[in-house]
Amino acid sequence: MAEVTVIGGGLAGCEAAWQLAEAGFSVRLLEMKPVQYTPAHHYEGLAELVCSNSLKADRLNSAAGLLKAEMTRLGSLLMRCARKSAVAAGGALAVDRKQFSDLATEAIRNHPNITLETAVVTEIPDTPTVVATGPLTEGALAADIEKRCGTRLSFFDAAAPIVSFESLDKEKVFFAARYGRGDADYINCPMNKAEYEEFYQALIGAERAPLHDCDKDAFRVYEGCMPIEVLASRGMDTMRFGPLKPVGLTDPRTGHRPWAVVQLRRENQEGTMYNLVGFQTNLKFPEQKRVFSMIPGLEHAEFHRYGVMHRNSFLDSPRLLDADYHFRGQDGLYFAGQMTGVEGYMESAASGILAGKNLARQLQGKPPLILPRETMMGALAAYISSAPTENFQPMGANMGILPDLPERIRGKQEKYQAYADRGMAALEQYLQTTEQ
């Protein structure tokens, strides 16, 4: 049995290792935890979710839902773990993060073809390898990657705070899902105009934590995970049209729509912890306590975790990677995960599925799986391998990267359903005509 190496036990690494093992290869999965942690990671298990427990929308007629359906069809390990560890979150798929990690770790440890080893890797081996070390890769391994790939790009990512349920003022908050979707899974903290404006002024004036390891002039916030204070600094009402938008919600105490709403999403199955949706932040911890306690219902909130900010790095993938995640110019070397320029938990995992499958196929002498661009996984792979190299930025699943529909459909939901139906049909046809 041929031996292959997967570096990194995150979402992409777990999926890549699983696909290779299922194809019959002997896999060495190298993970540096618990010997060494990145600034963002704290749990020793594999597939650790960091800044949120939400895996986004679950309905098929959404970009995230279509991606999940494709991953499931391709034998995703983590989709099975997500279903088993799901917590109520309206129309989204959210998970108990500890249980999700534990399930993934157990599956990897118990697979007869996978050997999980603790190791701080300093260079890419010459054997067939998938590199899935994540956007916080640093040290000797980062230097080795840079030597092979050239200069990498950087952006900053942020994580939201988590508060305890029992510390909330239940008289000031209410349970409801936006537009009545789901089973009232979100806790809503309504603000009137005066409360919002007072909170806004405190937020934009709050002291931020220093960014020690960066050139301040080159600091660029990645739009997909923007700190709430940066969003607020763009104008008085930017939060009200973003994570604090009140549309689709009615305060049962007043019978009216609030001026603004802060939503809390369940962090674990027991419902003892909730995270502040959209409140990724780089404020100093005492400032987070002071400012976020101004939110109605959070006056006496107990913070289980404060928000943090950290540096992420990704490859110049359009110059370096093919649409099967193969590193151009070196047989047997593949990259996967957010370091390739896909953005998001499931996007990272999806890239791991394709990297693992395609390394296996290369070793078997088979042609690579290049999924149709009508699929979300195929569109993401096409984007990171062929986007313009100038100002290349990471991309998450969205309907805008899919080819246009042949016919014009006016309704948004009907249009998205047509995208999803076409994508799943294209995937099925492709898989039926491609040797697995």
Image: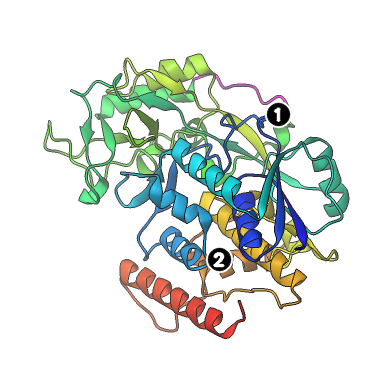
Q: Which is nearer the eye, 143 or 120?
A: 120
Residue type, numbered disc 1:
Val
Give the percent coordinates (x, y) of residue 324: 68, 68
Answer whether residue 390 is visible to the viewer in this image: no
Q: Residues within 10 Å of mark 2 (few under 14, many from 20)?
A: many
**Residue 112: image location, x then y, percent:** 62, 54
Could you tell me which secondary element the residue under label 1 belongs to? loop
Residue 347 in the image, given as x and y percentages of width and height: 55, 56
The correct choice, above or below, for 283 with respect to 160 in the image is above
Residue drawn 60% across and 32% down?
40
Near-viewer residue (211 or 203): 211
Q: Indicate the quadrant where residue 436 lies.
A: bottom right
Dot 1 alpha-carbon crowd within 10 angstroms: few under 14, some 14 to 19, many 20 or more: few
Q: Main secondary structure of the magenta part?
A: loop
The mark nearer the N terminus, 2 or 1, is 1
Gap between marks 2 and 1 measured at Cα: 33 Å
Q: Which residues are the magenta region? A: 206-212
Residue linked to disc 1: 35
Q: Nearer the viewer, mark 2 or mark 1?
A: 1
Q: Front-most of 202 and 164?
A: 164
Which residue carries the number 2 mark? 377
Residue 96 placement: quadrant: top left
Residue 345 lies left or right of residue 12; in this view the side is left
**Secondary element at tag 2:** helix
Q: Quadrant of residue 328?
A: bottom right
The percent coordinates of residue 240 (x first, y second) are: 35, 39
Is 72 left or right of 323, judged from the image as shown? left
